[in-house]
Image: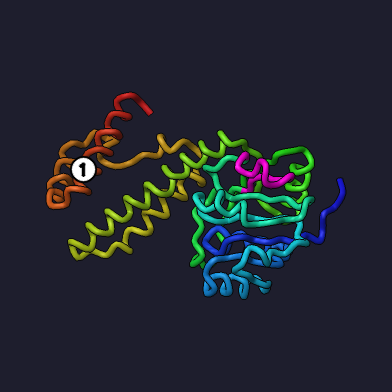
Amino acid sequence: MASFLPFKIVIIGAGGVATNIGRLLSGNGIKVTQILGRSAASTRQLADKLQCRYILDPQQLDQSADLYIIAVQDREIVPLLTRIKVPENAVVVHTAGGVSLDIFKGHFSKYGVLYPLQSLRKETIEVPEIPFYLDANAARTKDFLEDFSKQARLDYRWADDGQRMQLHVAAVFCSNFPNYLYSLAEKFCNDNQLAFASLLPIIEETASRLKREATSPAWLQTGPAIRGDIATTDKHLQLLEKDKEAFSVYQLLTGKIMHSRLLGK
């Protein structure tokens, strides 16, 4: 396979996904040559970190890059497509799990997806571990992305539109929903003059246990609900009576966990 190095990479976007992908590529020896963003402050900040040029006008997009990574919010991708022009042989990818590969059809000849299955914020101190899911519109595009991913030392695998959407749903259950529960726990602690920080070790242990013990989450479920300890769950509900939101969530999840106990793990 022909080598595509040295790669010239343009990142479109300056938010959490763009920032972490840019830092990951830079740390793995892949040079980002230009950033296109909307806000001068945030785009300049990312460009300074990656030691590259930045622009705010799509008409100034570098026309010599090999790969253009569109890392913006899902709803912003389609309006952007008519505003950017890339070289005929360049590859364009988006980073969204819930957006079809086919949105690029009719706009570019070589396109794909570079979906990072991770919650990414630009304030993160260190780039977290990121599994990438790739897709491509043609064999040549797939070869390019395969070569790029290997040389950028990405942890990658391939997934079509349907699989990426399923992964996106699963990620909501694993990340967004637990974080909402953390916010309820934080509010309960604040209302009762307790230190939410004292719960961080149990949060970390619950997550790390899955990887350490390499088994199903169902087998690692603990707490009064899975034990069928109604006396304790009733006491908990009494403590939550003043917080209708937390009360209803606790009651719902307790019922679901107890039901799973009756069905068997």
Left/right of residue 61 with respect to residue 244 in the rendered view: right
- In the image, residue 149 sits, relative to residue 22, either above or below, namely above
Left/right of residue 134 with respect to residue 138 in the rendered view: left
- In the image, residue 60 sits, relative to residue 169, either above or below, namely below
Left/right of residue 208 with respect to residue 140 in the rendered view: left
Q: Nearer the viewer, residue 103 or 182?
A: 103
**In magenta stretch: residue 203:** no
Q: Is residue 207 visible?
A: yes
Q: Position of residue 235 (x, y in %)?
A: 14, 45
Q: Which residue is mark 1?
A: 248
Q: Position of residue 51 (x, y in %)?
A: 67, 74
Q: Looking at numbered disc 1 in the image, what kind of residue is underneath it?
A: Ser
Q: Position of residue 259 (x, y in %)?
A: 28, 29
Residue projecting furthest to the top: 263
Residue at screen point 62% across, 72% down? 47
Q: Nearer the viewer, residue 54 or 127?
A: 54
Q: Position of residue 43 (x, y in %)?
A: 57, 70
Residue at screen point 52% across, 69% down? 39
